[in-house]
Image (cartoon, grey):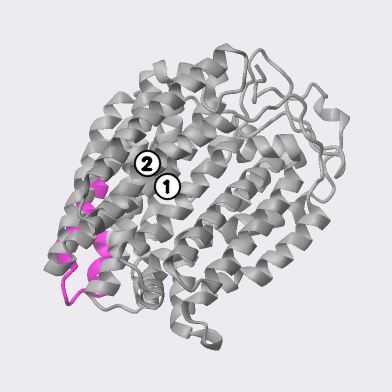
Amino acid sequence: MTDPLTLPATPPAALAPYRRRWPALAVILAGSVMEMLDSTVTSIAGPTIRAELGGGTSLIQWLGVAYALAMTAGLLVGGRLGDIAGRRRMFLIGAGGFVAGSLLCAAATGPEVMIAARAMQGLFGACMIPQGLGMLKEMFPPRELQAAFGAMGPVMGLSSVGGPTLAGWLVDADLLGTGWRMIFLINLPIGLALLIAAIAFLPAGRPAPGVRLDLPGAVLASGGALLLIFPLVQGREYGWPAWTFAMVAASVAVFTAFGWHEVRKSRSGGDPLIMPSLFRKRAFLGGMATGTIYFAAFSGFGLVFNLHLQLGLGFSPLRAAVAGIPLSVGMAVGMGVVQAVMRHGRKVLHAGAVTMTAGVLGLVPALDSQAGFWQLAPALLITGIGAGLVMGPYFDIVLAGVDPHETGSASGTLTTLQQVGGALGTAVLGTVFFSGLSAGPAAISDALWTVAAMIALTFLAGFLLPRYARQAEPASDRSPRPYAPHFRQILVDLRKREPRGGGSAAAPCQDRRDAPHRDTMPL
């Protein structure tokens, strides 16, 4: 079986660093920023989009769910496709498809086209992101790799704040009479410039020999997620008919078939998407439960909060976006605090869950008809700090309970799980909110109490995790912690790992034709 963590045997000193590595880093950053902005814009623009395109209230949920589900499906195979076809080629395909999906979003005239276009964005975004991240370790020597990673944290942190704010401003500004469509049209000039720069500066590299794609596994995993989430989104509008419960039951069967397929593929010497041995580890199973509940709570909270500000309190999109800034600021603070208290292990995660619960419940009395920025800011700041304390140590704690040769598969699975949890939270909490919307303020109260209950479950599931995080790597191998949960994968996917059976460190690229590809993404 091909080991995705196997590194090339070429001595590191044999190749000089890739000479265009810093412009290439700028290209990778630009692609990541474009993807992250579009992953967040519909949380603000959703009510405006629905008002123009029509459709049920579930359209607002599908704007995020379709993107997240497609991203999940793409992440399952995106890294492997880069190894098979070449990373620069897949980056260009991903970026081009993402821009095309953005154009379809802007041109959408009905809900169905809009949902399909959002899924297209997510799918091609998942093809683009793993390639850029995977090229960093190929291009930079160890002494510069830390600086390259260091540039990503602040940029991605600003993007997490700037996405909703930019969306709110563009919707309110109504540039050239385009209204909400400009949040997607802006990707056209950015994407064109990105494609030109990628051709000019990214290393061409070579496909890695012997890497195989587990497409049936990806289809089964994606199908199971769709069977679970579709009835949760649409069931309320259809009156919860019997087929919605049948789909949920079918999702269990499909996920079981996925597990059987992965075990069979591993025993036959193939390349499974997930190493079956992980499911015998209590730490990993606990990490899956903790992460799914947390990501669902956090993503669902963001949706219902923005919906209540606009539909319940009458905020404009821009005002709603600005009101949410304290949440991002608090998260940056929480991530920063983690650096000093990481030695306390899962106690930090538990403290974060308690803090986040207090912040969410503090919003219940604050979100009344008189609520403004300063009334909401304290509770949002506390919520963000708690979220940062949960997210900061999460991956390191979970990965402390797996063997070194399982780290790549485990981190890739947890990263993909982030998207599944986000889609699940959007479906569940969106349904709770819209079910009580006719009752006025009770809608947001019910949703916030549901978020608090989910975080309480996160607290309990945390006891299944190891007490302490895995030991830190040497400083030269350590990547900075990001400022938003979506980019925690930068740390876990690109951290230098010890390969199974030993091996040399990945060599930097000498030029655009000499990029080794055996140090693959863990998906």
Q: Position of residue 19 (x, y in %)?
A: 85, 48
What label sits on residue 227 in the rendered view? 2
Q: Position of residue 386 (x, y in %)?
A: 31, 48
Note whether 438 is above or below 125 in the view shown. Answer: below
When asked about the image quadrant of residue 303, the answer is: bottom left
Q: Which of 292 and 160 is in front in this view?
A: 292
Mark 1 → mark 2, Cα distance in angstroms: 35 Å
Tell me the kind of residue under disc 2. Answer: Leu
Q: Nearer the viewer, residue 114 or 185?
A: 114
**Magenta residues (range):** 355-379
When asked about the image quadrant of residue 51, the answer is: bottom left
| Left or right position of 343 against 159 | left
Q: Does the segment drawn in magenta span residue 398?
A: no
Q: Mark 1 points at which residue?
A: 335
Note whether 517 is above or below 121 in the view shown. Answer: above
Tell me if I can see residue 379 in this picture. Answer: yes
